[in-house]
Amino acid sequence: MMSRWITMRMPRGLDCGIGRLCATIGLAALIGLTIPRAHAAGDLSLSNPDGAAVRALVIGIDDYQHVRKLKGAVADATDIVTSLKSMGVGDVVELTNAQADRAGVLREISALVERTKNNDLIFLSIAGHGTQEPERVKGAEPDGMENVFLLPGFETTPTGSVERVLGSEFNHFIRQFELRGARVIFVADTCHGGGMVRDIDPRAAEMSFRQVPRYTLLVDELKPVSDSNDPKSELDLDHTAFLAAVDRYTKAPEVRIPGIDGLRGALSYAVARAVEGSADINHDGKVTLKELFSNVRQVVYQLSDQRQNIVTVSSPAQTPDTDVAFGLTRGVVLIQGPAARAASGQAGAGVPVDGQAPAPSAVTAKAPTIPTLAGAAKELPIAGAPGPLRLVAPIRLAALDGKTSYFVSVKPKDVSVQAVQPTDNPDLIWDPVSHDVIAWGDVVAYGMDVASLPTVIDRTAAIRELKRIATRSPQVMRIWPDDRQQRAGQTIEVDLSDVASRAVLLFNVSGDGTIQLLYPVGADAALARSASLRLPLRVGEPFGAEQIVAVTSQQRMVELETALVQFNRRRASGQVIKSLERYLPADARIASIGFFSAP
């Protein structure tokens, strides 16, 4: 029996709880993901498999004049534009903030239609506020509500009512692209209705969502763009793939991306990385719709700590398994010559064939903290243990009452800490009354005194790095039944897909940084014997944040497994990160997903 929050495993001898206990679900059909080769400048370019042009219109709006402003939509647009251009796409138009008024959007999308030729590939992307209104075309939507995209000047006055774009209008323009023989990828990093499954702790800083409340327009001056060729709904289109941040019933939050300041949209970030090549799962230079959808879906799920399950839809005429979304063409790589290396201070150093010098290690040695039976903690060494994290960006820590004097003696070992105000975008908020630690609307750890805060801070830095690593090469993993806060005694299930004949390592990082090895334990098989591995786990104390991490490979990861055994039951989150950096095999896939528990 496990002594922490996980207190139940399935009996031995049942193929480690896989196969017979795992119902057939859609996730089991998803294809695997492997580490994409990092490309140097000029190494990879995005191509159209039909041989025609790739064109894009990218919209991002933060600066709303009459409704709540957003914080990351413009950065999302810039990220996608930068990725497209770095991959060799020349026809890219970006509209941000005031540029994205209705006149500007209609002008640029109409001009893009005029430039479109047969077999072109069109990227359309919009990040900003969304909402829903009663549908204008009866029967177009199952719930009678139409998606609407709000522009910077929108308000409920007659003049402000014009500053929006209806979902049916985007469908109109997409049909125009299709009539010219083009294929379309449409990315909507907005939300249009619904609420949240997991409540936000009221002590947390206000979260940012890409949705405004429902409204009533007493006078609607909008004159929709339409004609007789318009599809009744998205399903009436022929050559279009849709990626939406959330379904019609949940909100899309702006999230924190590891290593990036501020907030962002997880969907836009994942799409930008997919465009750069991370979605080419089998490295054949062709990204199918299935590869694109599954890669982006898993990255968003991980970055949002389960708050987002994106929606992906392809036209009925398309076959996601085989239809190619876009191609990746490898170009000529310039290898630095001796003279150039000498000029840059690299004389005599070997340079890898991709032109990228290895990054120096930023980690030094430390021993983990081990809780004693009496509840205190002391330092014990681990032979050969790697050192702690040394990240550049500090963890921003605030007290709920705004006092920073509490943190004078707080000295984390793996990362620096900066005391800030609760309104100053903190990573962690500490409640001096209850001693709870809160992050992004969830309680990370309950009842942590000031002396215990360093391990929570170090854990925060470690999770940031885990998410960054997992984004590069995600392993498909889900935590069931949903993303709501799990209570004591409840059973959750961790479900890994496409792991047949792969070695599996599964561990948890608790809210105070304690590592718990979950698989393999005891007589567990070294290699998974079924395509889907499902492990039931029961929730127990201590409660707060849990980060389930899975690492899979075609070979058994003996050194990494040995390190995890050493770190088991120890507060060693920083050492685990260094072990991953040191021992990960080239074909490793990683999942890192958080969930939250409460008494």
Image: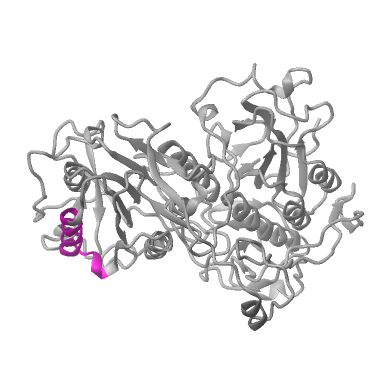
Residue 222: where, in percent of width, then height? 11, 54
Q: Residue furthest bottom?
A: 343
Q: Quadrant of the C terminus?
A: top right
At horizontal 23% and vertical 39% (from top left) the residue drawn is 145
At horizontal 60% and vertical 52% (from top left) the residue drawn is 467
Residue 419: image quadrant is: bottom right
Residue bounds of the magenta highlight: 98-114
Who is closer to the viewer here, 57 or 401? 57
Residue 561: where, in percent of width, then height? 80, 42
Q: Is residue 82 shown above or below 497?
A: below
Task: Indicate left or right for 63 with 589 as reference.
Answer: left
| Residue 181 visible in the picture | yes
Q: Is residue 46 shown above or below 229?
A: below
| Residue 156 visible in the picture | no
Q: Quadrant of the N terminus?
A: top right
| Colouring chosen for the image of the structure | one colour
Magenta highlight: main SS = helix
Residue 205: where, in percent of width, then height? 51, 61
Residue 532: image quadrant is: top right
Is 99 one of the magenta-colored residues?
A: yes
